[in-house]
Image (cartoon, rainbow, N blue to C red):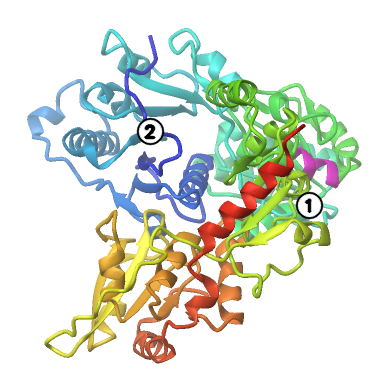
């Protein structure tokens, strides 16, 4: 009954994604629960990969996510209708109205998106998916509900692609969603860092009956260890009756914490106690604890047995706090390094970046690449920048050239791919190498300098504005959403005498050919992505560069290189409004002539020559 009839865009192209979140709680720290934390992490990860993500979420959500708020406003219902036996609670009706309005808007304006991802628990995105001319993905986070089961059956063929957060969840829905793809919830292991451990136990999550906080308290008291509790109070009656009376010297409530503070708390604990009283569909707190190096002691309920192994935790019969207490000391004795390794390894043993198990799309893509290699016998495969494709080619006996990237690349996947590569192409000048690279990487690296489609173009003559103002181009690209509309508006207002234009970023238009706008600009304000810098360099435009947060610190490392080379004015974050006038003057005075050191104009030729040499030496007689 499930499947899809839409043809998605080419996988290499950046996608415009509408991400539908929960309207009940804001997507912001401290998170109300795992669903909100997962939505924030998912949106951030998609944006870091270059996709344009619009998050539709409840009021108060993190503006840095590019959020469009779903207004939860009272719906005008007559007194007569309110007396009807079908009348539901006002919050439910408000949420229903918000999702209904959103889906109607998407149905009329979905050409702005390539994909709609329903990451909420609401049934309307499923029921109304046939009205949308773009693919719809729904992630199943809960046990089956009558509303969503009904929504699946509104059309003879439900056009929704379904994913499930665990095999347990997929099995629960199999009677009506027979082919859900299992995609475990992810966490950012760079944010959830290993901690030193300690003597106390920790329990984290929403404090509600189904999470079993009271059972964690019982187990801690029986074990003789202190317990620290953290999380939002989702049920005040439950907290007042079963948690607050037990608080004291050995059982403490630490509050509803932001992620850095929660990471510190979990990482400084001896073990994490996880006590679901329902079929936990994933258990994000388990992944967070393991990433902090903290082993897990919990109930074998729901999806927990999928995640917790004997190397990183102990599970007992659900509801048995005495058995849980006995399992505490064996859990505390487990290796914290093994717990961390398991968190890194849950998808692919920590050796790969993206290789989910039983993923038909991944299997199909890899099979096509393998078939092509077998049919054509290439003497060299160029990877830009998939670690998994690099390793596949090498396993099939094909030498590889890898397009290197700046930043911290000492993780196992990057290190393995760079070690095995025959050639590393570095799109930056040899005079500004990446610090800390091992000698054998440097020995096989060809520095091409930055290159772009505009190399060799002559900047167009500048037309001086008749009103004497100078021009700023804010060039942010499809993935540039780390700044808000308000911040740009404030910068524009604080820099009189400068006329701002925007390509990409918040509220900016997209242009397939930014060259005229680049040439017209007196100063370009941009992020530190390779392509944006290469195009700015080709135009020899003075620049203010604001590195954005990206995996492995890529843009931050690029910003440091630009500073070392005195190529642009670099600021580590979006400046305060009052600083912009001086920064623009500084960049304009600095000029853009030094960009020739970054992009000499023949980078593509250098790359082609290096690839041809590597391919020719790989041929067998």
Q: Residue at x 75, y 35 (%)?
A: 349
The x and y percentages for residue 370 are: 63, 24
- As displayed, is residue 537 above or below residue 370? below
Rounded to the nearest whole Å, what is the CA distance between mark 2 and mark 1? 35 Å
Sequence-first disc among 2 and 1? 2
Q: Count the labels in the image.
A: 2
Mark carried by residue 517: none
Q: Nearer the viewer, mark 2 or mark 1?
A: 2
Instruction: Please state, as top left, top right, bottom left or bottom right, where the N terminus lies in the image.
Output: top left
Q: Secondary structure at mark 2?
A: strand
The x and y percentages for residue 531 are: 45, 60
Instruction: Please state, as top left, top right, bottom left or bottom right, where the C terminus lies in the image.
Output: top right
Would you call the spot at circle 2 few (<14 residues within 10 Å), some (14-19), or many (20 or more)? many
Q: In the rendered structure, does residue 337 fall within the stretch colored magenta?
A: yes
Q: In the rendered structure, does residue 374 fall within the stretch colored magenta?
A: no
**Which quadrant holds residue 109?**
top left
The x and y percentages for residue 393 are: 68, 33
Q: Secondary structure at mark 1?
A: loop
- As displayed, is residue 105 above or below residue 479? above
With 574 as the anchor, is 504 left or right in this view?
left
Which residue is label 2 attached to? 118
Which range is magenta?
336-342
**Which quadrant holds residue 554?**
bottom right
The x and y percentages for residue 409 are: 70, 56
Pick whichever, 546 or 41, lies toward us. Answer: 546
With 46 as the anchor, is 299 left or right in this view?
right
Q: Residue at x 51, y 71 (%)?
A: 600
Pick whichever, 95 or 351, lies toward us. Answer: 351
Q: Main secondary structure of the magenta part?
A: helix
Which residue is label 1 attached to? 269
């Amino acid at each position: 009954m499930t499947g899809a009839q839409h043809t998605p865009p080419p996988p290499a192209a950046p996608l415009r994604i509408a991400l539908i979140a929960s309207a009940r709680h804001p997507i912001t720290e401290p998170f109300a629960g795992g669903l909100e934390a997962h939505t924030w992490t998912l949106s951030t990860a998609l944006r870091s990969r270059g996709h344009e993500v619009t998050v539709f979420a409840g009021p108060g959500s993190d503006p840095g996510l590019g959020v469009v708020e779903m207004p939860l406003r009272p719906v005008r219902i007559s007194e007569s209708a309110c007396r009807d036996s079908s009348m539901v609670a006002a919050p439910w009706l408000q949420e229903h109205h918000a999702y209904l309005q959103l889906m109607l808007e998407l149905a009329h304006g979905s050409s702005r998106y390539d994909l709609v991802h329903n990451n909420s628990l609401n049934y309307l995105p499923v029921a109304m998916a046939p009205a949308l001319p773009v693919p719809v993905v729904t992630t199943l986070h809960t046990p089956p509900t009558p509303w969503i089961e009904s929504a699946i059956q509104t059309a003879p063929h439900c056009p929704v692609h379904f994913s499930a957060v665990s095999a347990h969840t997929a099995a629960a829905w199999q009677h009506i969603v027979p082919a859900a793809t299992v995609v475990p919830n992810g966490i950012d292991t760079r944010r959830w860092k290993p901690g030193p451990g300690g003597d106390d136990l920790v329990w984290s999550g929403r404090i509600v009956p189904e999470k079993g906080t009271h059972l964690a308290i019982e187990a801690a008291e029986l074990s003789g260890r202190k317990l620290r509790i953290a999380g939002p109070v989702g049920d005040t009656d439950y907290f007042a009756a079963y948690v607050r009376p037990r608080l004291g010297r050995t059982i403490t409530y630490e509050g509803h914490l932001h992620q850095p503070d929660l990471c510190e708390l979990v990482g400084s604990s001896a073990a994490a106690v996880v006590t679901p009283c329902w079929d936990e569909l994933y258990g994000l707190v388990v992944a967070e604890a393991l990433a902090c190096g903290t082993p897990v002691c919990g109930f074998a309920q729901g999806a927990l047995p999928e995640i917790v192994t004997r190397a990183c935790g102990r599970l007992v019969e659900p509801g048995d706090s005495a058995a849980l207490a006995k399992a505490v000391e064996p859990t505390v004795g487990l290796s914290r390094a093994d717990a961390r390794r398991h968190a890194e390894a849950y998808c692919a043993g920590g050796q790969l970046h993206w290789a989910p198990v039983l993923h038909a799309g991944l299997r199909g893509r890899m099979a096509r690449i393998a078939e092509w290699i077998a049919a054509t016998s290439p003497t060299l495969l160029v990877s830009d920048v998939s670690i998994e494709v690099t390793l596949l080619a090498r396993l099939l006996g094909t030498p590889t050239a890898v397009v290197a990237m700046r930043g911290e690349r000492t993780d196992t996947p990057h290190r393995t791919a760079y070690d095995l590569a025959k050639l590393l192409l570095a799109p930056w000048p040899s005079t500004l190498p990446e610090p800390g690279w091992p000698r054998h990487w440097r020995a096989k690296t060809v520095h091409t300098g930055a290159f772009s489609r505009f190399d060799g173009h002559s900047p167009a003559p500048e037309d001086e504005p008749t009103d004497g103002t100078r021009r700023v181009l804010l060039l942010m690209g499809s993935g540039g959403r780390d700044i808000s509309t308000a911040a740009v508006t404030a910068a524009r207002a604080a820099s009189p005498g400068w006329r701002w234009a925007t390509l990409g970023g918040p509220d900016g238009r997209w242009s397939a050919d930014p060259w005229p706008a680049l040439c017209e600009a007196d100063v370009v304000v941009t992020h530190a992505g390779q392509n944006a810098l290469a195009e700015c360099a080709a135009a020899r435009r003075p620049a203010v560069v604001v590195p954005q947060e990206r995996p492995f610190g890529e843009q931050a490392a690029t910003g440091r290189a630009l500073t070392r080379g005195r190529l642009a004015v670099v600021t580590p974050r979006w400046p305060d409004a009052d600083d912009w006038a001086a920064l623009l003057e500084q960049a304009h005075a600095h000029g853009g002539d030094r960009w020739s050191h970054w992009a000499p104009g023949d980078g593509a030729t250098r790359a082609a020559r290096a690839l041809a040499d590597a391919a020719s030496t790989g041929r067998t007689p």
